[in-house]
Image (tube, rainbow, N blue to C red):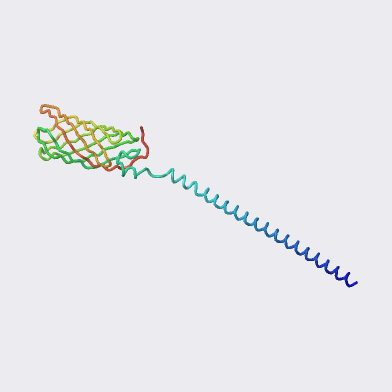
């Protein structure tokens, strides 16, 4: 009888232990599943938040690109040849006059021009004025100008005032080489009338671009 009771107790204890062990494993497995579920939810939430932030920032970036200013760095680097658009250019000129019957010498002046740039081409117009000190003569001129990259050419009307020959009218042709804000040029001028004359100028000019439009019209 005692042996039978001992066996039943042992069997009962074994069954209880097995049940407890099974319940522990089930609890552990359930905890693991819950942990994986929480991690999946957290990962989904983080991904959703990141996507939302990117979507919210994209219109701002696109708007910034659409309304970005013209390439002023290119303007600083290449002067009027650095980027497409329309510009006013203003600056001083300094030249040496050679072969003028009224007197050679140094001429100091300035120039205002308009240029429309469609890289690498540019097209525009100029107005300039200069004074030759030795001849005490002032000249003004205007006309069209064209260019390809750093090479340019302008031609136009010239009015000479003062000097030994008085008032004269003529034409000028000027090829130029532009690098940055500086241009070097050789200008030939023909003056007509009773005191017809031809003379040349070797000079330089510095012109800063003032943007007035961001797109070329040709």
User: Residue 17 versus residue 117: which sits nearer the camera?
Assistant: 17
Residue at 22% x, 38% y: name it: 184
Residue projecting furthest to the right: 1
User: Left or right: 73 with respect to 139?
Assistant: right
User: Left or right: 146 with respect to 108?
Assistant: right
User: Residue 141 versus residue 75: which sits nearer the camera?
Assistant: 75
- Locate residue 197, reporting x and y percent: 12, 29
- Locate residue 12, reporting x and y percent: 83, 67
Residue at 21% x, 36% y: name it: 185
User: Left or right: 73 with respect to 154?
Assistant: right
* Quarter in which the C terminus is drawn: top left
Residue projecting furthest to the front: 3
* Quarter in which the N terminus is drawn: bottom right
Residue at 24% x, 41% y: name it: 182
- Locate residue 49, reporting x and y percent: 56, 53
Residue 20 image-quadrant placement: bottom right
Q: How many marks?
A: 0
Residue 80 image-quadrant placement: top left
């Amino acid at each position: 009888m005692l042996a039978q009771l001992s066996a039943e107790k042992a069997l009962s204890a074994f069954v209880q232990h097995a049940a407890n062990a099974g319940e522990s494993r089930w609890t552990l497995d359930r905890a693991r599943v819950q942990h994986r579920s929480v991690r999946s939810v957290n990962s989904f939430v983080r991904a959703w938040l990141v996507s939302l932030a990117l979507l919210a920032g994209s219109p701002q970036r696109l708007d910034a690109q659409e309304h970005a200013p013209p390439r002023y760095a290119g303007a600083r680097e290449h002067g009027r040849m650095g980027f497409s658009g329309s510009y006013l250019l203003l600056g001083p000129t300094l030249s040496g006059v050679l072969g003028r019957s009224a007197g050679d010498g140094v001429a100091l002046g300035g120039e205002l021009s308009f240029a429309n740039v469609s890289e690498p081409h540019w097209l525009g117009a100029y107005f300039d004025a200069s004074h030759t000190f030795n001849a005490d003569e002032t000249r003004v001129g205007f006309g069209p100008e064209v260019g390809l990259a750093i090479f340019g050419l302008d031609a136009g009307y010239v009015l000479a005032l003062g000097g030994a020959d008085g008032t004269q009218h003529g034409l000028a042709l000027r090829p130029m080489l532009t690098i940055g804000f500086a241009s070097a040029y050789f200008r030939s001028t023909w003056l007509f009338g009773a005191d017809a004359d031809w003379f040349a100028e070797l000079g330089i000019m510095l012109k800063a671009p003032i943007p007035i439009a961001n797109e070329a019209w040709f």
